[in-house]
Each structure stands twice: as structure tokens, then as C-alpha cells.
Amino acid sequence: MSRLPMILATLLLALSACADPGEARPTQTTVQTTPRSTSQPIGQTTPTTQPTRDPHSGLRYIRASDLPREAPAVLRLIAQGGPFRYERDGVTFGNREGMLPRQPRGTYREYTVPTPGSRDRGARRIVCAGATRSTAECYYTADHYASFRRIQP
């Protein structure tokens, strides 16, 4: 289909050449085309592009480098198994909001991402699924479970 504009331009030029000599003819026809690789369907990613949404949860991805500066340290602690700053870190997250993929109870655990200047745990959390030290499937919320983003693996 990417060759279609080029074919149409060639046909237009051929037809204008066959026109009556007394008729005015365009002196130049310009057709702008944008080359596109036909080796990969639209919507699929290449090794250099990352998808914007997690296909499993439908949530938008967030890169670890785009998380608050306190979050990478929390991810490292999760992978190490602690020690955690807050007593409730590592408790089961019930997913009562239903915003994360539906899983059996006990699949998700929540961890606090400290908020500078906050007197309590604040609203920022990382929620991870799977084994206790796994960070393969983690989600970030900055608004105490009102919204989530999937942390890009």
C-alpha cells in the first residue's frame, strides 16, 4: 500500500501526457510519500521501541527512571527482602479497587515509597505480584490506589 501514491502519481502524469494539446496541463505534479517498512505490521513494536501499555493489565508503563527518586531504593529493598522502613511494608494488597489484574488473594504485596516532608507513610506505594522478592511485575501509585502504572521491567 505504501507504493500506491507513487503509482497514482505515475498514472496522473501518463494521463496528462495524453490530454488534448490545446488543454492546459499542469507543469509539475508532486506527490509526497512517506516510506514505511513493510516487514512489520503497524502497532507492533521493534526492538528499539517499547510499548506504552502493559498487555496483561492494560495499564500505562512507567520507567523506573521516571519514578520518584525514593522509589528505586524501595525496588532494591524488595529484591533483597528488606529491611523495610515501615511496619506495613510487605503486607498483602487486596486489590479491592480492582485496578490490577485479578489474581488470587495474597498475590500482591505493597510497599511504601517515602514522601519527603510527610508525617505518615504518604500516598505513594509500589505493589508487586509473585514471589516475595520478585520485582518482575510491580505497579506504582502516587495517589494511594486511585491509579496505577506498571513499572517497566
Image (cartoon, helix red, strand yellow):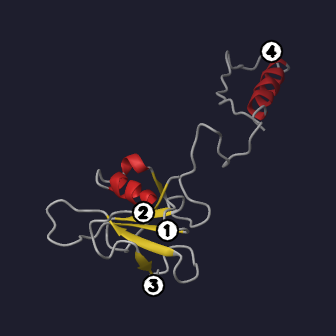
Kindly state the secondary structure of the residue where label 2 is placed: loop
Q: Which residue is mark 1?
A: 132
Give coordinates of residue 14: x percent, y percent.
83, 21
Against 77, residue 104 (above or below) is below
Mark 2 and 4 residues: CB-CB less than 8 Å, in contact? no
Q: Which residue is mark 4?
A: 21
Name the mark on residue 147.
Answer: none
- Tell me which amino acid carries mark 1: Thr
Query: Which mark is first along the chain, 3 or 1?
Result: 3
What residue is drawn where x is 43% and y is 57%?
80
Inspect this view and state whether residue 19 appears.
no
Q: Which residue is mark 3?
A: 96
Inspect this view and state whether residue 85 appears.
yes
Mark 1 and 2 residues: CB-CB less than 8 Å, in contact? yes
* Circle 2 or circle 4, nearest the eye: 2
Asked whether, in this view, residue 110 is left or right of residue 24, the answer is: left
Query: Which mark is first along the chain, 2 or 1?
Result: 2
Kindly state the secondary structure of the residue where label 3 is placed: loop
Residue at mark 1 to residue at mark 2: CA–CA distance: 7 Å
Q: Which residue is mark 2?
A: 81
* Circle 3 or circle 2, nearest the eye: 2
- Displayed quadrant of residue 38: top right
* Circle 3 or circle 4, nearest the eye: 3
| Front-most of residues 72 and 149 | 72
- Tell me which amino acid carries mark 4: Pro
Against 151, residue 145 (above or below) is below
